[in-house]
Amino acid sequence: MTQSLPFYQIDSFATEVFRGNPAAVCPSDTWLSDDVMRALAAENNLSETAFVVPGGEGGADYGLRWFTPTTEVDLCGHATLATAWALFFDLGVTKDALTFSTKSGILTVTRGDDGVLTMDFPQSKLMPAPHPEELLRALGHPALEFCKAKNGMVLALVKDALAVRKLKPVMRAVAELSDHGLIVTAPGGGEDGDVDFVSRYFAPRLGIPEDPVTGAAHTVLAPYWARRLGKNVLKARQVSRRGGDVGCEIAGDRVKISGRAALYLKGEARLP
C-alpha cells in the first residue's frame, strides 16, 4: 500500500526563492526506517533532507535527523532552519522557541517578530595545523592559514573576498583533505564590504561538491572571526552561486546563527 508523507522544499538563509540553500523537510508522526530516509534523501538530491518527529529525547519538542544524498550527518544548520520555518509558519506552532533532540545534543530555534529565525548551536573550535600538500592542489595557491575543527571540517584562510569568489577548487584534492569538508574564508571587502567575512564550503565526500549556505560551517567560522576581529556579533556571507547572508553571535561556548527562509514547494512524497 502506498504511503504519503508531507514534503517541503525551503530555501534557507534567503528572503526569496532561488537564493540561499534549498533543504527538504519531511515531518512524520514516527521515525521512518533508516533505509527509507536514505532513499528519500538520495531521491531529493539536495544537500540535506531533514526528518522531524514530535516528542524528542530529553524532553525536546521534536526529534530531528539530517541526511545528505549519501550519508547521515551529525549537524546541519540550513535544514534545521527550514524545519523550524515549516513548523512555525505552516504547521501551526504558536510558541516562539522550539527544541530539537539531535546527534549534536538539544538545539533551540527561536523566531523574532521580524521573521528572523535564530539557531543556538555548539561552537566547533579550531586548531592550527600544518599545510598539507593536498591543500595547495585543492586551492591552486597557498593558504594564509590552515586549521582543523573539532567537528572534522578544515578551514583555509585566503587573502581576500574576491579570491574566495573566484576559487575553482580541485575536488579530488578537497576530498583528500577531510571527510567533513573544506571551508575557504576571507575578510569582507569589495562588493562584500558590508559583511565581516565571507566563505564557501566544499564537501565532496559527503556528496556535496559545494554547499550553497552552510549553517554548520558557521559554528567554526563565527568563533574564528570573533577572535580575529575582536567582536562577538558578526555579519557573514556565503558567496556560492546562490549565496546567502548569515547572522552570527558568540554566546559563551555556543554560537547563535540567524537567517530567514522562503518556501519554494509544499506537497507530499509517495513511499512504496
Image (spheres, rainbow, N blue to C red):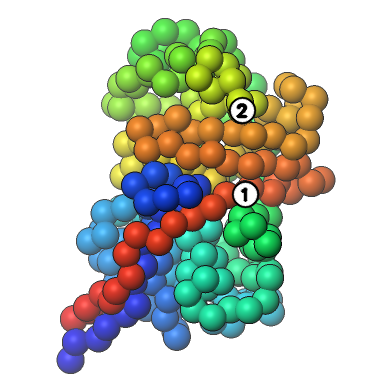
Q: Quadrant of residue 51?
A: bottom left
User: Considering the image in quadrants, where does the N terminus appear?
Assistant: bottom left
Kind of residue at disc 2: Val
Residue 215 drawn at (x, y percent):
54, 46
261 relative to 19, above or below: below
User: Considering the image in quadrants, where does the C terminus appear?
Assistant: bottom left
Q: Residue at x 26, y 60 (%)?
A: 44
* Residue 74 visible in image: no
Q: Residue at x 48, y 69 (%)?
A: 86
Kind of residue at disc 1: Ser
Q: Which residue position holds label 1? A: 258
232 relative to 73, above or below: above
Label placed on residue 40: none
State the residue in front, 266 or 50: 266
* Residue 44 visible in image: yes
Q: Is residue 199 left or right of residue 61?
A: left
Q: Quadrant of residue 28?
A: bottom left
SS for dot 1: strand
Q: Residue at x 60, y 69 (%)?
A: 100
Residue 84 drawn at (x, y percent):
54, 66
Q: Is residue 165 left or right of residue 209?
A: right
Q: Mark 1 and mark 2: span between their CA atoms? A: 14 Å
Q: Which residue position holds label 2? A: 195
Q: Residues within 10 Å of mark 2 (few under 14, many from 20)?
A: some
